[in-house]
């Protein structure tokens, strides 16, 4: 007798229907128009209450930190977040779940959250998740990447072997299926079509053609899966540069809704080949979070007390500090 197929019991937060997603994408403009705007305008125009948000990068590398700060300042409510390799980005966004400011994050598809890798756990992010005010569903980092892949391919799901026989599967909404060709048991992983994706890149033109140096992680698929996409870039480059070497374009203009030039936009995270992470400042975050009253003062100073990300950079050490981080990355990539 064959073993009965099982289903995970976790809730599904994003509609995996490829047909309904196609209805939206059919209405999305594809003309090569000027999309350059400020981070403040991009967040105000494109992120609404109750939407599903996915953040690109990996761990503390190539984070769209400037957008995360602005989301906290503008304080949209009841967002669902894809917790895919989320470290400092989740730490920032959890600041929106402070007493008296409502509930910025309401639900999380959780693969890796709360932790900042070798740096330790975020005390405030942990408080938020342990409070019970945020719902969560469990995934692996790989399964969330597969969900973006399915959406980028225009499919409602993809099969995979990973997670079979694990407690993560039990806490997810995945379903066991049988391969119609081999009879082998596989796991059906539902597609994820985020309402808004946010990605930081090395270079972009004003129309949204983007270049990324180094690994892109899941951002190739995230850009194509997201219904709306905000891109921040280290440098704005001419469209002639894009046309001169089109094979370097990872994200094409028709995926993008907003382009924001933000030098050092991944700070205090790392930007491969550009600057190293500011480990001292990340430690300041963790230290301040240990005491909730001190943490509120910290957030008032570094997020609510500034008007934009450039003021935050200035508060965090300004050009001398940023130059030092650039030198560290330069030396690291030369094996010294």
Image: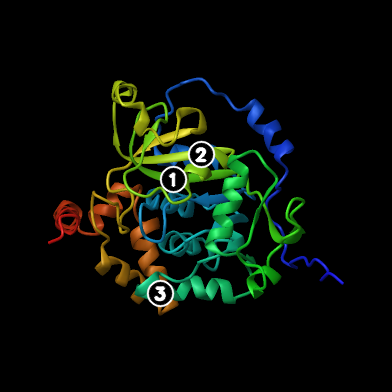
Count of all numbered marks drawn on residues in the image: 3
Q: Does the rendering let one see residue 104?
A: no
Q: Looking at the image, which residue is at 44% across and 59% down? A: 89
Q: Which residue is mark 2?
A: 229
Give the residue displayed 67% in from the left and 73% down from the top.
165
Split into 4 quadrants, where in the image is the N terminus? bottom right
| Image spot of residue 247 (x, y percent) | 36, 30
**Which image quadrant is residue 117 in?**
bottom left
Q: In the figure, 268 relative to 49: above or below?
A: below
Determine whether label 2 and label 1 are within 8 Å by CB. yes
| Residue ID for mark 1 | 199
Left or right for 142, reference 163: left
Whichever of labels 3 and 2 marks the residue nearer the N terminus, that label is: 2
**In the rendered view of the protein, which quadrant contains the C terminus?**
bottom left
Relative depth, front residue between 257 and 10: 10
Image spot of residue 19 (x, y percent): 73, 36
Give residue 289's mark.
3
- Asked whether 329 or 315 is in front, the reply is 329
Cα distance, mark 3 to mark 2? 31 Å
Label 3 or label 1, whichever lies nearer to me, is: 1
């Amino acid at each position: 007798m064959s073993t009965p197929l099982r289903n995970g019991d976790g809730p599904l937060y994003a509609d995996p229907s490829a047909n309904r997603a196609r209805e939206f994408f059919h209405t999305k403009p594809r003309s090569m128009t000027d999309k350059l705007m400020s981070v403040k305008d991009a967040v105000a125009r494109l992120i609404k209450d109750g939407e599903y948000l996915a953040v690109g990068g990996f761990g503390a590398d190539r984070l769209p930190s400037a957008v995360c700060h602005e989301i906290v300042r503008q304080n949209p409510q009841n967002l669902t977040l894809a917790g895919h390799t989320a470290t400092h980005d989740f730490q920032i966004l959890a600041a929106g779940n402070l007493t008296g400011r409502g509930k910025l994050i309401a639900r999380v598809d959780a693969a890796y959250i709360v932790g900042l890798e070798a740096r330790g756990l975020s005390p405030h992010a942990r408080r938020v998740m342990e409070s019970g005010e945020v719902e969560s569903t469990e995934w692996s980092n790989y399964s969330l990447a597969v969900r973006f892949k399915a959406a980028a391919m225009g499919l409602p799901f993809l099969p995979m072997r990973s997670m079979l026989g694990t407690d993560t599967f039990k806490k997810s909404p995945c379903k066991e299926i049988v391969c119609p060709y081999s009879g082998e048991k596989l796991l059906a992983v539902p597609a994820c079509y985020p309402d808004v994706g946010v990605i930081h890149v090395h270079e972009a033109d004003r129309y949204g053609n983007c270049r990324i140096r180094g690994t892109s992680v899941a951002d190739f698929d995230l850009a194509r899966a997201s219904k709306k996409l905000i891109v921040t870039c280290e440098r704005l480059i001419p469209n002639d540069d894009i046309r001169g070497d089109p094979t370097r374009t990872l994200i094409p203009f028709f995926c993008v809704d907003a382009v924001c030039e933000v030098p050092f936009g991944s700070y205090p995270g790392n930007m491969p080949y550009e600057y190293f992470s500011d480990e001292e400042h990340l430690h300041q975050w963790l230290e301040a979070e240990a005491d909730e009253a001190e943490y509120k003062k910290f957030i008032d100073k570094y997020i609510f007390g500034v008007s934009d990300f450039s003021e935050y950079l200035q508060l965090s050490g300004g050009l001398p500090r940023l130059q030092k981080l650039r030198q560290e990355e330069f030396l690291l990539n030369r094996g010294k």
